[in-house]
Image (cartoon, rainbow, N blue to C red):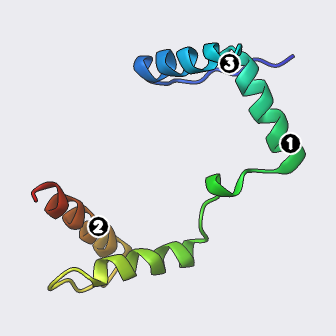
Amino acid sequence: MAKIEVKIADNVKQKAQNILHTHGLTISDFMQMAMNRVVEEGLPQYYAFAENESLEQSLQEIVSELPNEEITSKTTVLEGIANLIEQNNNK
């Protein structure tokens, strides 16, 4: 049997252990179940990543709603999203 190592924040590990324990599972049990499911059924849809063009279009739509933003590159899109997040955090 193969061994997998994962780096994760201590608090996340502890919370996951607590939740899994209430269901009679260990992290190892859960990871085996998750990996087997991926092998049998593929990656769950909610974990799938959008195609690059689709993702870029979605990001551009978000940024286009910002006032005075002109999108000229992927970097501009990311900067626009960062600005949007900052504006929302300052509200």
Quadrant of the rendering where the C terminus is positioned: bottom left
Alpha carbon distance from label 1 to label 3? 23 Å
* Residue at image mark 2: 81
Name the element at disc 1.
Answer: helix
How many C-alpha atoms fall within 10 Å of the one at disc 2: few (<14), some, or many (≥20)?
some
In the rendered view, does 30 fall on the left or right side of 62?
A: right
Residue wearing tag 1: 39
Which numbered disc, 2 or 3, marks the residue that appears first in the sequence?
A: 3
Q: Residues within 10 Å of mark 1 (few under 14, many from 20)?
A: few
Q: Which mark is residue 23?
A: 3
Q: Quadrant of residue 20?
A: top right
What residue is shown at x 70% (from left), y 22% (from top)?
Answer: 4
- Pick the front one: 1 or 18: 18
Circle nearer the N terminus (1, 2):
1
40 and 19: which one is in front?
A: 19
Q: Position of residue 83 (x, y in %)?
A: 19, 65
- Image: 76 above or below 5: below
**Residue at x-position 23% and y-position 86%:** 70
Q: Position of residue 86 (x, y in %)?
A: 17, 59
Residue 89 image point, x, y percent: 16, 54
Precedes in sequence: disc 1 or disc 3: 3
Q: Amino acid at mark 2?
A: Ile
> What residue is rendered at 38% in x and 82% in y?
61
Residue kind at label 3, given as amino acid type: His
